[in-house]
Amino acid sequence: MSPPTMTTAAAATATAMAAGVLPRPRPHFLRRGILPSAASPLPFASRVSSAAPLRHRLPPPRFSLSPIPKTLSSPSHVPVRSLFTGIVEDVGTVRRIGPPPAPPSGGGGEAPGVDLEVETSSLLAGTQLGDSVAVDGACLTVAAIDAAASTLTFGVAPETLRRTSLGGRSAGDAVNLERALTPASRMGGHFVQGHVDGTGEIAAFRAEGDSLWVTVRAPPEILRLLVPKGFVAVDGASLTVVNVDEEGGWFDFMLVRYTQDNIVLPNKKVGDKVNLEADILGKYVEKLLAGRLEAMSKA
């Protein structure tokens, strides 16, 4: 069968369109408004003359690395300015804790704060004034550096003394030390803010092979954020929770030999206090669920 031939009318129409006498038919998707025609450029296209080539200019990305505005944060919001992993870098020794030395002028005024001076063998290099260091899990700011004495001095706020066990430290005590993360740091533990939630009490030690079981009594507001195989920071050390007993008021974890040799905890006694920080993910989940349940109850 021979191919169909073009009729005389169709041939005349094609010739007229080729000569520009008749406009070419627009595709159906343009007629139906699915895509804009050339007369109406895309919303993000630059407004240029028809003689110039059409260029698409995407708006610049809009983001900010500044802290969350106070108007968008809750009253209890504390911006994350430093982050730790819970991998202890050094075990330091408390040299002094108490009011800072009196100024030479000897002036009076408001009550002095509390200084914590810690000797460290490996954290002086690269540490500068204003840097953040987790001391037994509490994020503190370096206020003074004495290279000759190998000491770092931190100012300790009243809230830190109330919330942590640092107020009970004395000269000669050992403390875990970790500097804040840098962009090149390895993420070996978990996200630790250095914002201690409260203190717990060592309830028991039990050896199993060369590992050590540790049981800690903790308040309900911390226990409810802990889950088996989840994270917890104990005196700033990132540890894996094994068991949680909310009714009994305790949780436990196991320390391998290397961890025992590089943190303070095994040298403590039953009844000693430890600083506790629950995993930040658990806190966010709890807050989101609480808001959801409140909204459902009002609906």
Image (spheres, rainbow, N blue to C red):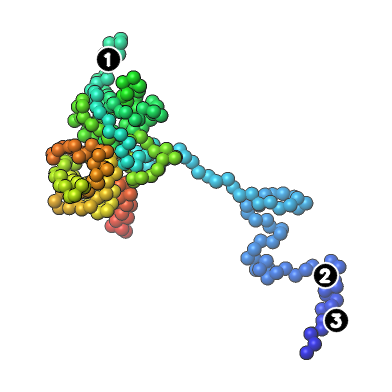
**Which residue appears farthest toward the top when viewing the image?**
105
**Which residue appears farthest toward the front when viewing the image?**
209
Say which quadrant the C terminus sits in.
bottom left
Q: Which mark is residue 17?
A: 2
The kind of residue tagged 1 is Ala
Measured as percent of width and height from the top left, residue 120 is found at 30, 28
Is there CB contact under 8 Å for labels 3 and 2? Answer: no
- For image coordinates 24% across by 46% down, the residue present is 256
How far apart are the alpha carbons under marks 1 and 2? 97 Å
- Residue 82 figure quarter: top left
The kind of residue tagged 2 is Met
Specify whether 197 is left or right of 180. Answer: left
- Residues 212 and 232: in front is 212
Measured as percent of width and height from the top left, residue 25 is found at 75, 70
The residue that disc 3 covers is 8
Query: Please, is residue 68 above or below residue 230 in the view?
Result: above
Specify whether 32 is left or right of 210. Answer: right
- For image coordinates 27% across by 49% down, the residue present is 240
- Residues 185 and 47: in front is 185
